[in-house]
Amino acid sequence: MAVRRMSRRSCFGALFPLALAGCGRAAEAEQPEMWIQSTLVPAGPHAGAVSTLTWVMVIGGALIFVLVIVLAAAAILMKPERRRWMTSRGFIIGLGIVFPVATLTVLLVYGLAVNRSLVASGAPIARIEVVGERWWWRVHYLDETGGIRAVSANEIRMPTGRPVEFVLKTQDVIHSFWVPNLAGKLDMIPGRANAYRFAADRPGVYRGQCAEYCGAQHALMAFYVVAMEPAEFEAWLSRESGPAREPTDPFLARGKAVFNESGCGACHQVRGTPAAGRVGPDLTHVGGRRSIAAGTFPTNIGTLAGWIASAQHLKPGNLMPSFGNLQGEDLRAVAAYLESLK
Amino acid sequence: VKDRARDVPDMRSPPEGDVTEYPNPIPRPPGELEELKRVWDSPKGIRVLSAVNNNYVGLWYVGTALLFFVLAGILAVMIRTQLAQPELRLIGHELYNQLFTMHGTMMMFLFAVPVVEAMGVFLLPNMSAARDLPFPRLSAYAFWAYFVGGLAFFASLFFGLAPDGGWFMYPPLTGTQYSPGINADFWLLGIGFIEISAIAGAIEIIVGVLKTRAPGQSLDKLPIYSWAMLVFALMIVLAFPAVIVATLLLELERAFHWPFFIAEKGGDPILWQHLFWFFGHPEVYVIFLPAAGMVSMIIPTMARTPLIGYRLVVLALIGTAFLSFGLWVHHMFTTGLPQLSLSFFSAASMAVAVPSGIQIFAWIATIAAGRLQMKTPTYFVLGFLFIFTLGGLTGVMVAMVPFDWQAHDTYFVVAHFHYVLIGGMVFPLFAAFYYWAPVASKRPLSETLGKWAFWLMFIGVNVTFFTMHITGLMGMPRRTYTYIAEMGWGSLNMISTVGSYMIAAGVLVFLVDLAKNFRPFQEEAGNVWDAGTLEWLPSGLYQTRSIPIVTSREPLWDQPRLAEDVDAGRYYLPGAPTGGRETIVTSPIDGNPQYVLQVPGPSWATILAAFFTAAFFIGLTIQLYIPAFLCGGLAVVSVIWWLWQTDPGPADPERFDIGGGLVLPTYVTGPANHSWWAMIVLMMVAGACFACLLFCYFFLWTVRPDIWPSAEGPLPPLALGLGSAVLMILSSAAIWAGGRMLARRDERQGAIRLLLLAGIPLMVGGITLEIQGQLAAGVVPSASGYSAVVFALASWQGFFGAVLTLMALYTVARSMTGRLNAVRRSTYDNMQLFWHYTVAQGVIALLVVHGFPRLLG
């Protein structure tokens, strides 16, 4: 696969809360923090509550497991007269019925409480519609009336601090929307719109991935969530809803021309240009997004050129054909043009 | 004519303790044993394939299931190899998606369910000292259908045609729009067909456990394994119909565009998920319960003491089965269901931990009460306790809704269910292989190789799957053919892959052990563990020389001379007085002998029926329709040939003394008859399928009430619905009148035939009226989810109408050839039961389809 330079420390330390401080994020200068995709490194109240619940259950489960193993070992190894107490019906009823009923009831009450705390109330700070596609994500930023303010793909920007409502739909088969560091997953089901509210505590970049098997390229259907301060988000969104940048030099202009001549606009939209296709991802601001091909490659001229020329080789079975006929300067020009669409 | 079942002698109080008076004197007459051997001997040479005896079919069945275990295991190792490092390109997404679909599907449908049924076919008659199962040809049919169908299904991999929609086959991904190839059809037709084989086996097991036991083996003396198999088979009967209906509907959608699951047309993909998991969750316990039953047999023997908490364990088995039907929604926690139903199913999912807890502590208590011998079966049982307990605890974790939102469809879940299934089923099964091998083989399996196999598998399973808990929590989703290096999952995956090779090595050691030591169909190694239950009695193909009276749960421990006396022929039925195969049929609760069943012997009809049934389904899948329907016709002919030899009437002698003055008839009808029970179970299956179809009707209504007709239509006039119901009820009346006449004046065969023949057009007319009425009202099946489900109900009834037509014609043929009279009337009785059931089903369907929209107004 092509070059990718998203350096992050892969870290086992993510498993241990104490080690979290120095782990989980590999900060780069002037870039938002990049978080490793993990349920155990929460960055929002939703994932945080579940993470606590996980640790409670892991520790409780481990204790019960040790108890069972110790009892089994005692039943085999202790002197017969000292293990007689284990042979009564009371032993079976006590440990097999009373004990699990008691512990499970406590756990259930705790779980329901966690569950309730996750159902956010009050108006969301923003509403974002995400539509699952084979195998990428269409993103609509909605206004108060449900109209579309901006269209994007494979990257979701959200304001921090308060819950954002995600309206989850699908264009084709069932997908599942999942950002492990922020919240659990929720399916995107034909004929339904699932609403999901969760918040990000602080700015950062979080990776998400499709969690319901959706066919050929389910494995390479990821996205990034970029959480920003609310004011910064608002400013970004008004830029994002605007048209694409015009080319600033002849090379980029050539790229734009080749893009339109090659029929890219049949599937892709670049607002402010003749390209108005709705089948594939909106490319109006593709250069400003972190990844292409749904979280598969970082966005740069090299990966864009590679993707255009051999999409079928890089992500076999995806719905974009390889444009092998685009070569040399033409290919570089198109890639540079797209990269310039910040 | 009075009910012949009432002629049966009463045997409430069998003798206790060591017996001094035996039913039959010794020495036995010369030639008796030779006759018994001759009658039960298997055909020689290639004709051995026509054998139907449970010893043969059981072992072939287990062997085939093991073959699929190994094949599906190889697929798993391929999957693990591809995932060993990030971005490997050994296996592309196309093959990979087929591999994980096939691995899951084969392990569930071609290994787990068949192997526990197979072990049941082999062990159950042994445990009850029955000479065979009540329907040996049915188990042979189930086996051969599975064998041929399973191999054809597996072969699809070699042509790139294997299904690739996941073992759960969620539409719309598996609908024609997104899966236009025939890969999905292989799953739907192949698995649909193997489910039918599983149901055939389940019917056999239910009737076998309830009706063919040793005299005195009342339900409270039944080995726990038999209890587990009874519960298991009942669960299959209730759970499998859901997936049969689901596959049927999806295939109808694919073939004829009836949009059950297409949202734009008023279907709903979630409907599939409900049906699939209503089967899919009980399925897990379907696999686990027989394994738990095996453990409850092995631990007492190895600890040299009876199981502590027998009644609690039986209750736990029943409780597990009951609860398992109430928690399917926990596979759907992430679909966006209402909070209230999430909470309910979360609680139910946790509650199911209780019966498992009861069993685990009953086993620990039993171990504490005795002295555990550390043999290979013991190792596997202890390994099971370790792995299964861990899997159970992670099961409680994923039952918690908020946790499941994170863990669902990640490697955490993969880890969880492999712990449950490998721990809960594969380890007990291997324990069972080592434990019961001496019942089947001349030599026991090797203790040395067995321990090697155990340690490799035990360490391998923990290395492979414990790691996956972490991989999953670190965010790796399931069913992904690759992952990028930056995710940091590389080392964890490498560890899992190494572990999977260890498991494979362990299975290989076991296979070597089998090749070296397993020698079936010869003299048996015998009671090497000094166990207490009846399968350890000395036996041949005829099972035991004579059939003992059971007075306790561990007869061989409580009656030290039992084995010797049984083998000397001192107990019941020491020969073969009718000159054919026989076994004793007992009452379901107390185990009182009721009659001597004439057991069918070797037959080619069953193999041919199975082969042609398989060919019919394979032909449909690969779209060779003409050969397919030819084979379908031949399958029907073979089944009729097979049936023709059943319902033999009283034997010669009509009734005889099986020992101790206990005179039993050789033929009875009514509720004492074994086939009556099988028909009742079959009606349960049909009823469960029908209930699923009704569920579809009401479920789709809740999703899309707007497409339902109102009282104004489009609905056929009420008169047509009423007319259809009246015609069907009249057909039932004709069949009922024929039955009365057969009982009272069976010389009037002509009139009986006329009544049978009158029943056919009445039934068919009733169904046609409904279909015509719907079409005339403008309801077209491909138009919407509503019309599709209305036609699904009508077609279901139509299928039953076709079967009843065949049954009625068959009964007429029995009458014309003199095989039907007041005594010999099981065929008529069973047909009549099925007829009345069908009419009841049809009337209910009409009430719903015509009444419900009018009720809504």
Image (tube, coloured by chain):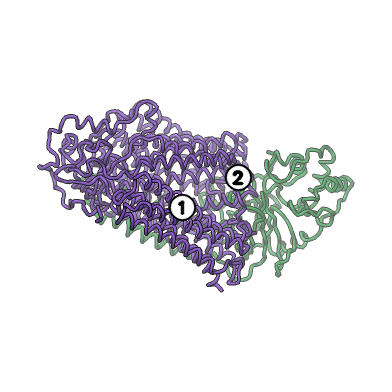
Chain colours: A green, B purple
Is B392 situated above or below B30? below
| Residue B540 visible in the current orientation | yes
Image location (x, y in percent) of residue B833: 38, 55
Q: Name the front one of labels 2 and 1.
A: 1
User: Which type of secondary structure does the marked residue at label 2 adopt?
Assistant: helix
* B442, B654: nearer the viewer: B654
Q: Report the amino acid beneath label 1.
A: Pro
Mark 2–mark 1 contact, CB under 8 Å? no
Q: Who's the residue at 81% across and 45% down the image?
A: A336
Residue identified by numbered label 2: B487
| Residue B379 visible in the current orientation | no
Q: Quadrant of the N terminus of chain A?
A: top right
User: Which type of secondary structure does the marked residue at label 1 adopt?
Assistant: helix
On screen, residue A239 versus residue A132, left or right, reads right
Q: Residues within 10 Å of mark 2 (few under 14, many from 20)?
A: many
Q: Report the Cα–Cα distance between label 2 and label 1.
A: 42 Å
Image location (x, y in percent) of residue A311: 72, 42
Residue B419 occupies which quadrant of the picture? Answer: top left
Give the label on residue B667, or none: none
Give the label on residue B241, or none: 1
On screen, residue B566 versus residue B70, left or right, reads left
Is B857 situated above or below B329? below
Residue B790 occupies which quadrant of the picture? Answer: bottom right
**Chain of the residue displaying label 2:** B
Q: Report the amino acid beneath label 2.
A: Met
Image location (x, y in percent) of residue B250: 56, 51
On screen, residue B133 versus residue A18, left or right, reads left
* B332, A244: nearer the viewer: B332
Image location (x, y in percent) of residue A156: 68, 56
